[in-house]
Amino acid sequence: MNFKKRIKTYKSSKVFDFSYFYTMQFQDIIGQRELKHHFIQEIEQEKVSHAQLFLGKNGYGSLALALAFSQYLFCENKQAMDSCGVCPACKKVSDLQHPDLHFTFPVVLAQHKTSNGALDLWREQLKKTPYFDLSHWGSFIDPKGRKPIIGSDESQEILKKLALKSYEGGYKIMIIWMAEEMNPTCSNKLLKILEEPPAKTLFLLIAENQEKLLPTILSRTQLVKVPRIISDDLSLFLRNKGGFSQVLIDSVVGRVDGDVVEALELLSASDAQEQNRDLFIQLMRVCYKKDVIAMMDWAETLTSFSRDHQKTFLNYCLHMFRQSLLRNYTDNQLTKISEEEEAFLKNFAKFITGNNIHDFMKTFNDAHYHIDRNAHAKLLFTNLCFNVMRYIHFA
Protein backbone atom coordinates (compact mmCIF):
# COMPACT_ATOMS: atom_id res chain seq x y z
CA MET A 1 0.00 0.00 0.00
CA ASN A 2 1.57 3.30 -1.08
CA PHE A 3 0.36 6.01 1.25
CA LYS A 4 2.36 8.71 -0.54
CA LYS A 5 0.11 8.36 -3.57
CA ARG A 6 -3.03 8.50 -1.44
CA ILE A 7 -2.11 11.46 0.76
CA LYS A 8 -1.15 14.86 -0.63
CA THR A 9 2.18 16.30 0.43
CA TYR A 10 1.74 18.93 3.08
CA LYS A 11 4.00 21.99 3.06
CA SER A 12 3.88 23.79 6.38
CA SER A 13 3.93 27.57 6.36
CA LYS A 14 4.70 28.99 9.76
CA VAL A 15 3.66 32.53 8.83
CA PHE A 16 -0.13 32.31 8.61
CA ASP A 17 -2.12 35.04 6.89
CA PHE A 18 -4.88 35.63 9.43
CA SER A 19 -4.04 39.30 9.81
CA TYR A 20 -6.68 41.68 11.03
CA PHE A 21 -6.87 45.35 11.94
CA TYR A 22 -5.52 45.71 15.44
CA THR A 23 -5.62 48.97 17.43
CA MET A 24 -3.82 47.95 20.65
CA GLN A 25 -7.01 48.32 22.71
CA PHE A 26 -8.65 45.95 25.18
CA GLN A 27 -11.60 45.62 22.81
CA ASP A 28 -9.38 43.82 20.30
CA ILE A 29 -8.29 41.13 22.76
CA ILE A 30 -10.01 37.77 22.45
CA GLY A 31 -11.72 36.96 25.74
CA GLN A 32 -9.75 37.54 28.98
CA ARG A 33 -12.46 39.74 30.53
CA GLU A 34 -11.25 39.28 34.09
CA LEU A 35 -7.69 40.29 33.28
CA LYS A 36 -8.83 43.33 31.32
CA HIS A 37 -10.86 44.47 34.32
CA HIS A 38 -7.92 43.75 36.64
CA PHE A 39 -5.54 45.91 34.59
CA ILE A 40 -7.98 48.81 34.37
CA GLN A 41 -8.54 48.71 38.13
CA GLU A 42 -4.80 48.53 38.75
CA ILE A 43 -4.22 51.72 36.77
CA GLU A 44 -7.25 53.59 38.10
CA GLN A 45 -6.27 52.84 41.70
CA GLU A 46 -2.63 53.77 40.96
CA LYS A 47 -1.39 50.40 42.15
CA VAL A 48 0.74 49.54 39.13
CA SER A 49 3.55 47.16 40.05
CA HIS A 50 6.84 48.28 38.50
CA ALA A 51 7.73 44.79 37.18
CA GLN A 52 5.09 42.29 36.08
CA LEU A 53 5.45 38.88 34.50
CA PHE A 54 2.64 37.86 32.14
CA LEU A 55 2.85 34.09 32.20
CA GLY A 56 0.89 32.05 29.66
CA LYS A 57 1.03 30.69 26.14
CA ASN A 58 1.41 33.30 23.44
CA GLY A 59 -1.84 32.06 21.95
CA TYR A 60 -3.70 33.15 25.08
CA GLY A 61 -2.97 36.81 24.29
CA SER A 62 -0.18 37.83 26.68
CA LEU A 63 1.43 40.23 24.21
CA ALA A 64 -1.94 41.70 23.19
CA LEU A 65 -2.73 42.31 26.86
CA ALA A 66 0.62 44.03 27.42
CA LEU A 67 0.02 46.34 24.45
CA ALA A 68 -3.52 47.23 25.52
CA PHE A 69 -2.32 47.76 29.11
CA SER A 70 0.38 50.13 27.83
CA GLN A 71 -2.02 52.09 25.66
CA TYR A 72 -4.50 52.46 28.52
CA LEU A 73 -1.72 53.68 30.80
CA PHE A 74 -0.57 56.28 28.26
CA CYS A 75 -4.09 57.30 27.17
CA GLU A 76 -4.93 60.97 27.78
CA ASN A 77 -8.68 60.39 27.86
CA LYS A 78 -9.24 57.04 29.54
CA GLN A 79 -12.71 55.51 29.21
CA ALA A 80 -14.39 53.25 31.74
CA MET A 81 -13.51 50.03 29.90
CA ASP A 82 -10.78 51.00 27.43
CA SER A 83 -8.40 53.62 26.13
CA CYS A 84 -10.01 56.26 23.92
CA GLY A 85 -8.06 55.20 20.84
CA VAL A 86 -8.02 58.71 19.35
CA CYS A 87 -5.82 60.88 21.57
CA PRO A 88 -2.23 61.56 20.43
CA ALA A 89 -0.82 59.04 22.91
CA CYS A 90 -3.17 56.27 21.75
CA LYS A 91 -2.34 56.94 18.12
CA LYS A 92 1.37 56.75 18.85
CA VAL A 93 0.99 53.41 20.63
CA SER A 94 -1.25 52.02 17.88
CA ASP A 95 1.40 53.02 15.35
CA LEU A 96 4.07 51.52 17.63
CA GLN A 97 5.89 54.85 17.61
CA HIS A 98 5.38 56.06 21.19
CA PRO A 99 8.79 57.31 22.39
CA ASP A 100 8.26 55.89 25.91
CA LEU A 101 7.20 52.41 24.80
CA HIS A 102 10.19 50.13 24.26
CA PHE A 103 10.45 46.52 23.11
CA THR A 104 12.90 43.71 23.69
CA PHE A 105 12.44 40.43 21.83
CA PRO A 106 14.50 37.50 20.54
CA VAL A 107 16.54 37.99 17.38
CA VAL A 108 18.86 35.82 15.32
CA LEU A 109 22.26 36.92 16.60
CA ALA A 110 23.90 36.25 13.24
CA GLN A 111 21.68 39.03 11.85
CA HIS A 112 21.35 41.45 14.77
CA LYS A 113 22.97 41.68 18.18
CA THR A 114 19.97 43.45 19.72
CA SER A 115 16.26 44.02 19.09
CA ASN A 116 16.95 47.44 17.56
CA GLY A 117 18.10 45.87 14.31
CA ALA A 118 14.79 44.03 13.81
CA LEU A 119 12.46 46.73 15.13
CA ASP A 120 10.87 47.44 11.73
CA LEU A 121 10.05 43.76 11.29
CA TRP A 122 8.69 43.64 14.84
CA ARG A 123 6.35 46.53 14.11
CA GLU A 124 5.28 44.91 10.86
CA GLN A 125 4.40 41.69 12.68
CA LEU A 126 2.51 43.46 15.48
CA LYS A 127 0.44 45.50 13.05
CA LYS A 128 -0.70 42.25 11.43
CA THR A 129 -1.52 40.53 14.71
CA PRO A 130 0.00 40.28 18.20
CA TYR A 131 -1.05 36.61 18.33
CA PHE A 132 2.09 34.70 17.27
CA ASP A 133 4.69 32.50 18.92
CA LEU A 134 8.47 32.20 18.81
CA SER A 135 8.39 29.69 15.98
CA HIS A 136 6.30 31.97 13.77
CA TRP A 137 8.47 34.96 14.65
CA GLY A 138 11.66 33.03 13.83
CA SER A 139 10.29 32.01 10.43
CA PHE A 140 9.22 35.58 9.74
CA ILE A 141 12.63 37.13 10.38
CA ASP A 142 14.92 34.37 9.14
CA PRO A 143 14.28 32.09 6.13
CA LYS A 144 17.02 29.76 7.40
CA GLY A 145 14.97 28.98 10.49
CA ARG A 146 17.68 29.77 13.04
CA LYS A 147 16.44 30.12 16.59
CA PRO A 148 16.17 33.70 17.87
CA ILE A 149 17.31 34.54 21.41
CA ILE A 150 17.84 37.59 23.60
CA GLY A 151 21.61 37.94 23.79
CA SER A 152 23.94 39.50 26.32
CA ASP A 153 24.22 42.80 24.39
CA GLU A 154 20.50 43.42 24.87
CA SER A 155 20.83 44.26 28.57
CA GLN A 156 23.02 47.27 27.83
CA GLU A 157 20.46 48.57 25.33
CA ILE A 158 17.69 48.20 27.90
CA LEU A 159 19.66 50.08 30.53
CA LYS A 160 20.53 52.81 28.05
CA LYS A 161 16.91 53.35 26.98
CA LEU A 162 15.56 53.44 30.51
CA ALA A 163 18.27 55.79 31.75
CA LEU A 164 16.76 58.55 29.61
CA LYS A 165 13.98 60.77 30.93
CA SER A 166 10.45 60.11 29.75
CA TYR A 167 9.74 62.02 26.54
CA GLU A 168 6.07 62.53 27.41
CA GLY A 169 6.63 63.16 31.11
CA GLY A 170 4.86 60.00 32.27
CA TYR A 171 5.67 56.31 32.37
CA LYS A 172 8.43 54.55 30.48
CA ILE A 173 7.45 50.98 29.57
CA MET A 174 9.76 48.15 28.57
CA ILE A 175 7.99 45.10 27.13
CA ILE A 176 10.26 42.04 27.09
CA TRP A 177 8.63 39.37 24.94
CA MET A 178 9.69 35.74 25.48
CA ALA A 179 11.71 36.75 28.53
CA GLU A 180 12.75 33.12 29.10
CA GLU A 181 14.92 33.41 25.98
CA MET A 182 17.26 35.89 27.73
CA ASN A 183 20.65 34.32 28.22
CA PRO A 184 21.96 34.28 31.83
CA THR A 185 24.31 37.22 31.26
CA CYS A 186 21.49 39.42 30.02
CA SER A 187 19.18 38.33 32.85
CA ASN A 188 21.74 38.98 35.57
CA LYS A 189 22.53 42.48 34.30
CA LEU A 190 18.85 43.42 34.64
CA LEU A 191 18.43 42.32 38.24
CA LYS A 192 19.33 45.65 39.81
CA ILE A 193 17.07 47.76 37.60
CA LEU A 194 14.23 45.29 38.08
CA GLU A 195 14.56 45.64 41.83
CA GLU A 196 15.15 49.40 41.91
CA PRO A 197 13.90 50.93 38.64
CA PRO A 198 13.92 54.66 37.91
CA ALA A 199 10.74 56.52 38.82
CA LYS A 200 7.69 55.66 36.69
CA THR A 201 9.51 52.87 34.87
CA LEU A 202 7.44 49.78 34.15
CA PHE A 203 8.67 46.36 33.06
CA LEU A 204 6.19 43.99 31.41
CA LEU A 205 7.85 40.61 30.94
CA ILE A 206 6.04 38.06 28.79
CA ALA A 207 6.91 34.39 29.08
CA GLU A 208 5.53 30.93 28.42
CA ASN A 209 7.90 28.83 30.52
CA GLN A 210 8.42 29.91 34.11
CA GLU A 211 11.02 27.22 34.70
CA LYS A 212 13.41 28.73 32.15
CA LEU A 213 13.52 32.07 33.97
CA LEU A 214 16.11 32.72 36.65
CA PRO A 215 14.67 32.52 40.18
CA THR A 216 16.10 36.00 40.80
CA ILE A 217 14.03 37.35 37.91
CA LEU A 218 10.90 35.66 39.25
CA SER A 219 11.43 37.05 42.73
CA ARG A 220 11.56 40.60 41.36
CA THR A 221 8.35 40.46 39.32
CA GLN A 222 4.66 40.28 40.13
CA LEU A 223 3.20 37.18 38.52
CA VAL A 224 0.14 37.63 36.30
CA LYS A 225 -1.13 34.29 35.03
CA VAL A 226 -2.79 34.55 31.62
CA PRO A 227 -5.32 31.70 31.32
CA ARG A 228 -6.44 29.95 28.16
CA ILE A 229 -9.15 31.61 26.08
CA ILE A 230 -12.51 30.05 26.86
CA SER A 231 -13.99 28.00 24.03
CA ASP A 232 -17.01 30.24 23.39
CA ASP A 233 -14.82 33.35 22.96
CA LEU A 234 -12.39 31.56 20.67
CA SER A 235 -15.21 30.05 18.62
CA LEU A 236 -16.86 33.47 18.20
CA PHE A 237 -13.58 35.03 17.07
CA LEU A 238 -12.97 32.31 14.47
CA ARG A 239 -16.57 32.44 13.27
CA ASN A 240 -16.34 36.20 12.75
CA LYS A 241 -13.29 35.72 10.54
CA GLY A 242 -15.52 33.82 8.11
CA GLY A 243 -14.74 31.20 5.52
CA PHE A 244 -15.01 28.11 7.70
CA SER A 245 -17.87 25.87 8.70
CA GLN A 246 -18.97 25.73 12.32
CA VAL A 247 -18.20 21.99 12.30
CA LEU A 248 -14.56 22.69 11.39
CA ILE A 249 -14.34 25.51 13.93
CA ASP A 250 -15.75 23.27 16.66
CA SER A 251 -13.23 20.58 15.77
CA VAL A 252 -10.32 23.04 15.90
CA VAL A 253 -11.48 24.70 19.13
CA GLY A 254 -11.77 21.27 20.74
CA ARG A 255 -8.15 20.55 19.91
CA VAL A 256 -6.27 23.74 20.81
CA ASP A 257 -7.19 24.26 24.48
CA GLY A 258 -7.85 27.98 24.13
CA ASP A 259 -4.75 28.78 22.04
CA VAL A 260 -5.65 31.17 19.22
CA VAL A 261 -2.21 30.86 17.57
CA GLU A 262 -2.62 27.11 17.22
CA ALA A 263 -6.24 27.53 16.09
CA LEU A 264 -5.29 30.00 13.36
CA GLU A 265 -2.47 27.78 12.21
CA LEU A 266 -4.78 24.77 11.93
CA LEU A 267 -7.35 26.79 9.98
CA SER A 268 -4.75 28.36 7.70
CA ALA A 269 -3.70 24.82 6.80
CA SER A 270 -7.20 23.37 6.79
CA ASP A 271 -6.27 21.06 3.93
CA ALA A 272 -3.97 19.32 6.43
CA GLN A 273 -7.05 18.46 8.49
CA GLU A 274 -8.13 15.98 5.84
CA GLN A 275 -4.60 14.66 5.45
CA ASN A 276 -4.18 14.09 9.17
CA ARG A 277 -7.54 12.35 9.36
CA ASP A 278 -6.55 9.99 6.54
CA LEU A 279 -3.17 9.31 8.15
CA PHE A 280 -4.79 8.55 11.49
CA ILE A 281 -7.41 6.23 9.99
CA GLN A 282 -4.83 4.34 7.97
CA LEU A 283 -2.54 3.96 11.00
CA MET A 284 -5.32 2.50 13.12
CA ARG A 285 -6.47 0.14 10.35
CA VAL A 286 -3.10 -1.31 9.44
CA CYS A 287 -2.17 -1.70 13.10
CA TYR A 288 -5.46 -3.44 13.88
CA LYS A 289 -4.84 -5.83 10.99
CA LYS A 290 -1.21 -6.34 12.12
CA ASP A 291 -0.14 -5.67 8.53
CA VAL A 292 3.57 -5.12 9.12
CA ILE A 293 4.43 -4.21 5.52
CA ALA A 294 1.67 -1.58 5.44
CA MET A 295 2.84 -0.30 8.83
CA MET A 296 6.38 0.16 7.53
CA ASP A 297 4.99 1.90 4.44
CA TRP A 298 2.97 4.22 6.67
CA ALA A 299 6.04 5.06 8.78
CA GLU A 300 8.01 5.81 5.61
CA THR A 301 5.29 8.25 4.51
CA LEU A 302 5.38 10.11 7.83
CA THR A 303 9.15 10.33 7.60
CA SER A 304 8.85 12.27 4.34
CA PHE A 305 6.79 15.05 5.95
CA SER A 306 8.22 18.15 7.58
CA ARG A 307 8.86 18.10 11.31
CA ASP A 308 6.11 20.68 11.83
CA HIS A 309 3.60 18.49 10.03
CA GLN A 310 4.72 15.46 12.02
CA LYS A 311 4.07 17.35 15.27
CA THR A 312 0.71 18.60 13.98
CA PHE A 313 -0.26 15.04 13.12
CA LEU A 314 0.71 13.74 16.57
CA ASN A 315 -1.38 16.47 18.19
CA TYR A 316 -4.27 15.47 15.95
CA CYS A 317 -3.96 11.86 17.10
CA LEU A 318 -4.04 12.93 20.75
CA HIS A 319 -7.19 14.91 19.99
CA MET A 320 -8.83 11.87 18.37
CA PHE A 321 -7.98 9.64 21.32
CA ARG A 322 -9.58 12.15 23.68
CA GLN A 323 -12.65 12.41 21.47
CA SER A 324 -12.92 8.61 21.35
CA LEU A 325 -12.91 8.43 25.12
CA LEU A 326 -15.51 11.21 25.37
CA ARG A 327 -17.69 9.37 22.87
CA ASN A 328 -17.52 6.21 24.95
CA TYR A 329 -18.12 7.71 28.37
CA THR A 330 -20.34 10.77 27.74
CA ASP A 331 -22.72 9.27 25.20
CA ASN A 332 -21.19 11.49 22.51
CA GLN A 333 -22.39 14.64 24.29
CA LEU A 334 -19.04 16.46 24.61
CA THR A 335 -17.26 15.54 21.39
CA LYS A 336 -16.15 18.26 18.99
CA ILE A 337 -15.42 16.60 15.67
CA SER A 338 -16.34 16.86 12.01
CA GLU A 339 -18.88 14.62 10.30
CA GLU A 340 -16.09 12.60 8.67
CA GLU A 341 -14.36 12.08 12.00
CA GLU A 342 -17.63 11.09 13.62
CA ALA A 343 -18.20 8.48 10.90
CA PHE A 344 -14.86 6.87 11.70
CA LEU A 345 -15.17 7.10 15.48
CA LYS A 346 -18.58 5.42 15.35
CA ASN A 347 -16.79 2.10 14.93
CA PHE A 348 -13.29 2.94 16.14
CA ALA A 349 -13.98 4.62 19.52
CA LYS A 350 -14.71 1.29 21.22
CA PHE A 351 -11.02 0.39 20.84
CA ILE A 352 -9.99 3.31 23.08
CA THR A 353 -10.78 2.47 26.69
CA GLY A 354 -9.48 2.88 30.21
CA ASN A 355 -7.28 -0.16 29.56
CA ASN A 356 -5.13 1.50 26.90
CA ILE A 357 -5.77 5.27 26.87
CA HIS A 358 -2.83 5.99 29.17
CA ASP A 359 -0.47 4.05 26.89
CA PHE A 360 -1.78 5.79 23.78
CA MET A 361 -1.47 9.27 25.31
CA LYS A 362 1.99 8.69 26.74
CA THR A 363 3.37 7.17 23.53
CA PHE A 364 2.12 9.97 21.31
CA ASN A 365 3.14 12.70 23.76
CA ASP A 366 6.60 11.17 23.97
CA ALA A 367 6.80 11.01 20.17
CA HIS A 368 5.94 14.71 19.95
CA TYR A 369 8.64 15.48 22.53
CA HIS A 370 11.29 13.52 20.64
CA ILE A 371 10.34 14.90 17.20
CA ASP A 372 10.75 18.39 18.66
CA ARG A 373 14.27 17.36 19.63
CA ASN A 374 15.30 16.00 16.23
CA ALA A 375 14.74 12.30 16.85
CA HIS A 376 15.30 9.89 13.94
CA ALA A 377 11.84 10.11 12.35
CA LYS A 378 11.80 6.71 10.63
CA LEU A 379 12.77 4.84 13.78
CA LEU A 380 10.31 6.86 15.85
CA PHE A 381 7.31 6.28 13.59
CA THR A 382 8.17 2.61 13.05
CA ASN A 383 8.26 2.11 16.80
CA LEU A 384 5.01 4.08 17.07
CA CYS A 385 3.29 1.67 14.68
CA PHE A 386 4.24 -1.39 16.70
CA ASN A 387 3.14 0.23 19.95
CA VAL A 388 -0.24 1.13 18.42
CA MET A 389 -0.59 -2.46 17.19
CA ARG A 390 -0.13 -3.67 20.77
CA TYR A 391 -2.38 -1.12 22.45
CA ILE A 392 -5.29 -1.37 20.03
CA HIS A 393 -5.74 -5.02 20.98
CA PHE A 394 -5.78 -4.21 24.72
CA ALA A 395 -9.22 -2.62 24.62
Image: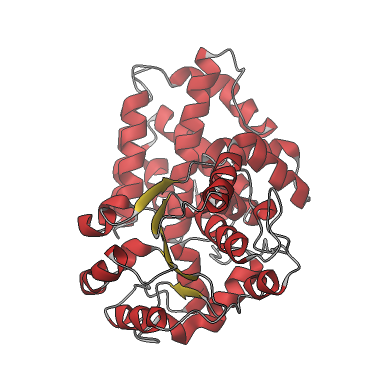
Count of numbered tags: 0
120 up-or-down from 311: above or below: below
Instruction: Please state if 214 lies on the left or on the right of 104 as rendered.
Output: left
Tell me, yes or no, if residue 259 can be seen here: yes
Q: Residue at x 55, y 19 (%)?
A: 327
Colour pattern of the rendering: secondary structure
341 up-or-down from 383: above or below: above
Residue toward you, 159 or 56: 159
Q: Residue at x 23, y 74 (%)?
A: 189
Q: Quadrant of the C terminus?
A: top left
Tell me, yes or no, if residue 278 can be seen here: no
Residue toward you, 87 or 231: 87
| Image location of residue 56, percent across then percent down | 43, 49
Q: Residue at x 54, y 39 (%)?
A: 255
Q: Quadrant of residue 182?
A: bottom left
225 up-or-down from 191: above or below: above
Instruction: Please state if 40 lies on the left or on the right of 151 as rendered.
Output: right
389 up-or-down from 127: above or below: above
| Image location of residue 366, percent across then percent down | 30, 43
Q: Residue at x 58, y 61 (%)?
A: 73
| Image location of residue 369, percent across then percent down | 31, 49
| Image location of residue 321, percent across then percent down | 46, 29
Residue toward you, 352 or 184: 184
Q: Quadrant of residue 303?
A: bottom left
Instruction: Please state if 165 lies on the left or on the right of 260 as rendered.
Output: left
